[in-house]
Image (cartoon, rainbow, N blue to C red):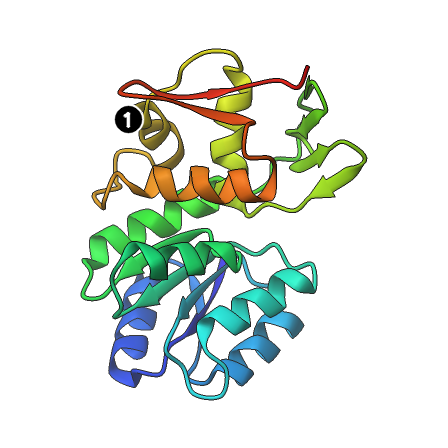
Amino acid sequence: MRLLIVEDEKRLALSLAKGLTAEGYAVDVVHDGREGLHRATEGTYDLLILDIMLPGLNGYRVCAALRAAGHDVPILMLTAKDGEYDEAEGLDTGADDYLTKPFSYVVLVARIKALLRRRPATGASPVHVHGDLKVDTAARRVFLGEGEVVLTAKEFSVLEHLVLRAGEVVSKADILEHVWDFAYDGDPNIVEVYISVLRRKLRAGLIRTVRGAGYRLETAP
């Protein structure tokens, strides 16, 4: 597995690279947003660790540019910022996960492994059709009506879990367990952030909130 770290705090970047190399990953490091975008575009990476506050281009712009160019490499964002707005902004630009500094190295490795496990599968999987929503779990593609909706890996995982249980109420805890796994120790409200993003990308009424219980995927009439 080959990882790219884009982080301007050189001591942190080199420390992460050393640790991840010891974990068995091949790691490249750059300290500038423009260079990070260039390397991510030209290279073949399995995962990108991307700081938000970068010289040249900030992490939001790097992430958005990669997604606009069709690159679906999993992106784990690092930032000294904290708050739901910053998290939502990162997710809106296409990030798959979000870690606020200071963070535990053990948690970072767990998040990386979780993202890598969720890379698109090559085996055959069914296509799920619910009204005008079609979710192809083999190709990891989503269509609404006549158009395709581009989702990040984590957004797709949340939607996929709801699709597989369409019509049922799925609790926040259940989504956390199946999409983030046991290693996640952050704010459980991250589920609400992803649901909000999915509603904006799909349709507001497609995912219903059942107060005190969870969420239910509705189908079009």
As drawn, 165 above or below 41: above
Task: Name the residue tied to disc 1.
Answer: 173
Please name whichever residue, 133 or 152, is drawn nearer the observer in this view of the structure. 133
In the rendered image, residue 164, in percent from the top left (x then y), is placed at 54, 18
Within-10-Å neighbours for mark 1: few <14, some 14–19, many 20+: few
Outermost residue, right side: 146
Please name the residue shown 40% across and 52% down the image: 97
Along the horizontal axis of the image, is 118 left or right of 130? left
Q: Residue furthest top?
A: 168
Instruction: Report which quarter residue 31 is drawn in.
Output: bottom left
Secondary structure under the numbered disc 1 in the rendered image: helix
From this view, report whether residue 149 is shown above or below residue 17. Answer: above
Residue 181, relative to residue 48: is it above or below? above
Q: Which quarter of the rendering shows the C terminus? A: top right
**Left or right, residue 145 beside residue 89:** right
Q: Residue at x 49, y 40 (%)?
A: 118
Does the image show residue 39?
yes
Frontmost residue, 181 versus 62: 62
Above or below, comparing residue 63 to residue 120 in the picture = below
**Could you say where residue 7 lies in the image, as x and y percent from the top left?**
37, 77
Residue found 45% across the figure and 41% down from its top: 196
Q: Is residue 82 left or right of residue 156?
A: left
Residue at the far bottom: name it: 56
Whether residue 43 is visible, yes or no, is: no
- Residue at coordinates 59% horizontally, 45% vertically from top-left? 151
Residue 144's quadrant in the figure? top right
